[in-house]
Amino acid sequence: MTPADLAAAILDSTRAVLTERGLDTSVLPHSIGVERPRNPEHGDYASTVALQVAKKVGANPRELATAIAGRLETVDGVKAVEVAGPGFLNVRLDPAAAGRLARVVVEAGREYGRSAALAGESINLEFVSANPTGPLHIGGVRWAAVGDALGRLLRAVGAQVGTEYYFNDAGSQIDRFANSLLAAAKGEPTPEDGYGGGYITDIANAVLAKRPDALSAPDPKEIFRVEGIALMFDEIKESLAQFGVHFDRYFNEKDLHDQGKLDAALARLREQGHVYDAEGATWLRTTDFGDDKDRVLRKSNGEWTYFAADCAYYLDKRERGFERVVIMLGADHHGYIGRMKAMSACFGDDPKRNLEILIGQLVNLLREGQPLRMSKRAGTVVTIEDLVEAIGVDAARYALARFSVDSPIDLDLDLWTRRSNDNPVFYVQYAHARIASLLRNAAELGVTRGDDFDPGLLSHEKENDLLKALGEFPEIVASAAELREPHRVARYLEELATAYHRFYDACRVLPQGDEEATDLTRARLWLVEAARTVFANGLDLLGVSAPERM
RNA sequence: GCGCUCGUAGCUCAGUGGAUAGAGCAGAGGACUUCUAAUCCUAAGGUCGCAGGUUCGAAUCCUGCCGGGCGCGCCA
């Protein structure tokens, strides 16, 4: 019996009790969950459904709980139900019913944890979106790790997902980049407002290698612009690929201009009645929908604003069939939320459903407890490559994905390279490697788990705890996807690793010395394989490897 | 000034209105002739920033205040 099965049984029992009494069953939610109480006296699972429902139907919660308990106790697999406190339902499962979960997990294999929780949703996920004026810095890398994990999560629960990287290769940032390259190629100092750092010299030299005539050409700056961007972007894409991140689409802002999408968006907004002209410029009345000031779409000099391109890009995503547009931005851009939400409403969309903007706090890096001060100008930026070189892809992805994006994080580079329990990624990976090792030993001994096992044998306290943790995985995946919070998967895996290590410590799996394999050996091999499956599936959702050996 | 966001153990952080608020690290004590000790066990550590409010029940929701971070261009 899985937690989902139990929750469904509790809901059924509650509905039956309400019906029996002629009470309104429409107050019941479509689905409920069960909790896993920390205190073992509170049973294997607990439900608060009686507390939630009692008031709405005018019943006494404790008495209602008692009636539900009476029905629930007759359900196959339920061993006992107690009513506690104001009306908690504390459920104990039959050990065999709990143990059968091992089979469910093993047979589902790579599918275990996947569901149809968000089936039918079409979601566009935009993240990183750094312009190709330099290597990816640490903030962008956080989004690469979190965004990619979120994409994997959303797909795992049945959503249609398109991941995108938006960039532009025109405009003043790129201009400064081109000027900096040109100066470096001529051996001149970095221009005012230019980009410093060693990578500029590297790229300038690479351009010269490719186009030896660049400096004597009619328009050297244009050559450095075009070739420099191409080289820089290749480097970014290569870094992302090594980081395990692939985008479905790299979207160039220029395409919006070339295809007349800005005019089309403006026309659409005008139709909707939210556009006006004033002071020679064209404005979007975002204040109609809560923004603190109206925004210019086309400047008085006839040029489009960046915001106008944002509008066109949003509309383009929607017209490509994405019902939900999710954009991940750094905290320094949170001021855009108001205008973006209002823009969505100006198109006639529901900004709550159609547009989600996720704001991620910044990342500080520490080395030996001291903050690494970063400056793009001085070229002392910590790049994706620096990070991977310092701590490796697995640790980097895990470290950046294990925290809520709401909290600014301090990453201690020394900690994440340590091969010890300080380091959560090793703690989780070690659990997987330990299982892999155990399974290799089993194969060597010629012990196999067989086609079937007696689930009632998995009745040790630590086996029960492990089974319960394994049972939670699908719900964790679904909630992490729905809440757009991949860090929940990492935290869950850490708990699962604790449950596994405790089980391993308390329960011998393989026979020792001359002992023969027993039914318990086989049952435990099913459990161990189930645990291996969940570690592998969970780590895969984070884009972190599940090593066979460490 | 206005807006957003955060404030939980010495440190780094979990905690989608539920029971006695958790984990790791640091510090104290214990378990290795190992199915990988990169592990496990025990004890200790808290006015959940402060004050009100809603609720049977608040770290969680609402209001105000205090403190930190960030943002408030016809820049990109």
Image (cartoon, coloured by chain):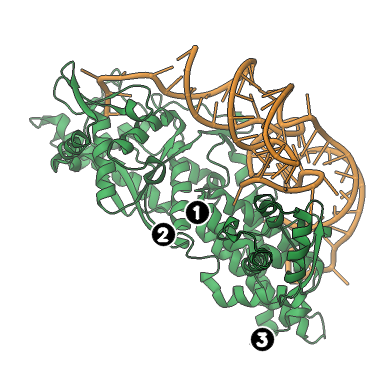
Chain colours: A green, B orange
Question: Which chain's residue wears label 3?
Answer: A
Task: Tell which residue pokes out farthest to the front in this image.
Answer: A22
Task: Give left or right: position of A233 versus A29.
Answer: left
Identify residue for label 3.
A452
Identify residue for label 2.
A159
Residue count near mark 1 (Cα–Cα under 10 Å), binned few <14, some 14–19, many ≥20 = many
Task: Tell which residue pokes out farthest to the left in this image.
Answer: A218
Name which residue type carries label 2: Ala
Give the label, 3 or 1, closer to the camera: 1
> Distance between the Cα atoms at labels 2 and 3?
34 Å
Task: Give left or right: position of A64 versus A545.
Answer: right
SS at badge 2: loop
Name which residue type carries label 3: Asp
Task: Give left or right: position of A490 versus B32.
Answer: left
Mark positioned earlier in the residue sequence (2 or 3): 2
Identify residue for label 1.
A481
Location of residue A273 with respect to A451 vertically, above or below: above
Give how far across and how far down residue A295 sits, in percent: 28, 25
